[in-house]
Image (cartoon, helix red, strand yellow):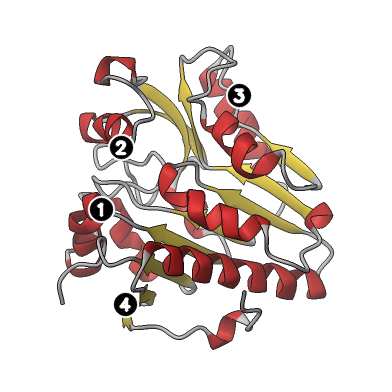
Amino acid sequence: MSTAPVTDRSVDRTVGRLQVRGFPTRRAMAETAAADIAATLRRLLAGQGAVRMVFAAAPSQADTLDALRRAPGIDWSRVTAFHMDEYIGLPSAAPERFAAWLDDQVFTRLPFAAVHRIVPEPDPAAAAARYAALLGEGPLDIVCLGIGVNGHIAFNDPPVADFADPLDVKVVELDEACRQQQVDDACFPTLADVPLRAITLTIPLLLRGRELFCVVPGRSKRDAVAAALTGPIATSCPASILRTHPDCTLYLDPESAPDA
């Protein structure tokens, strides 16, 4: 796996400030994204004592996390991990919880300095405030994210997305397109099983991350990617705001890349 510095990443094109990279296969996309994240981790850890990092939980991120786990030369004992959203209303041991998914993928498989999980119970609003306080204890160095079929980033669906949100973490209602995606991704058996509410990091908080890596495979994401790249920068497609970030790279496979 490449250890080239992040500044050597080649890009297919730049849209606004967003760097866009396309790949011939989903595996090539995931491995390159993981190599870039790993190179950034090594560079940051060489120059500072610790790194604070946010992870997305979704099947679309699994290949990248698998490759990142195998990346050599990273002192994970100096990395503090957060995640960006969590359902409200699931049993504490439910495998569908995002913390449980990330535990399986990465949180319990690497020797992090600390892992901060979102625990909605018993009071989701208080839990959001507590998580915001943890996030506010220092800068966020790396944010690994995706884009939903409705253009959401984290659980900032179009009806609740706010580019000037005064909160860093909040309770939200999930829209039906977002909830249906969870069924289509085989995370829940039916729409009725998907929770109606969640806790999410807000868009301003995500954009405060120093370097963002956005991995978006799959045909179901193509329309959202097209809107993010070519539509207005508007909450109708929350991911469109990524075009304003000074250091965000979007990784696409052949199915998610919109037609030129």
**In the depicted structure, whether residue 196 falls above or below residue 31:** above
Question: Between marks 2 and 4, how big is the CA–CA gap?
Answer: 24 Å
* Residue 10 horizontal/vertical position (percent): 45, 86
State which tag comes first along the sequence, 4 or 3.
Answer: 4
* Residue 208 horizontal/vertical position (percent): 54, 59
Q: Amino acid at mark 2?
A: Val
The residue where tag 1 is placed is 221
Q: Is residue 220 left or right of residue 8?
A: left
Q: Which mark is residue 160?
A: 2
Q: Residues within 10 Å of mark 1 (few under 14, many from 20)?
A: many
**In the depicted structure, whether residue 124 falls above or below residue 116:** above
The structure residue drawn at horizontal position 48% and vertical position 15%, both measured from the top left corner, is 90
Question: Between marks 3 and 1, how big is the CA–CA gap?
Answer: 29 Å
Quadrant of the rendered structure where residue 67 is? Answer: bottom right
The residue where tag 3 is placed is 119
Question: Between marks 4 and 1, how big is the CA–CA gap?
Answer: 20 Å
Q: Amino acid at mark 4?
A: Gly
Quadrant of the rendered structure where residue 120 is? Answer: top right
Identify the secondary structure beneath mark 4.
Answer: loop
Q: Which-is-in-front pick, marks 4 and 3?
A: 3
Q: Which-is-in-front pick, marks 4 and 1?
A: 1
State which tag comes first along the sequence, 2 or 4.
Answer: 4
Q: Which-is-in-front pick, marks 2 and 1?
A: 1
Is there a contact, CB below 8 Å, between mark 3 and mark 2? no
Q: Is residue 109 left or right of residue 25?
A: right
Q: Which mark is residue 16?
A: 4
Q: Residues within 10 Å of mark 3 (few under 14, many from 20)?
A: some
Q: Could you tell me which quadrant the N terminus lies in? A: bottom right
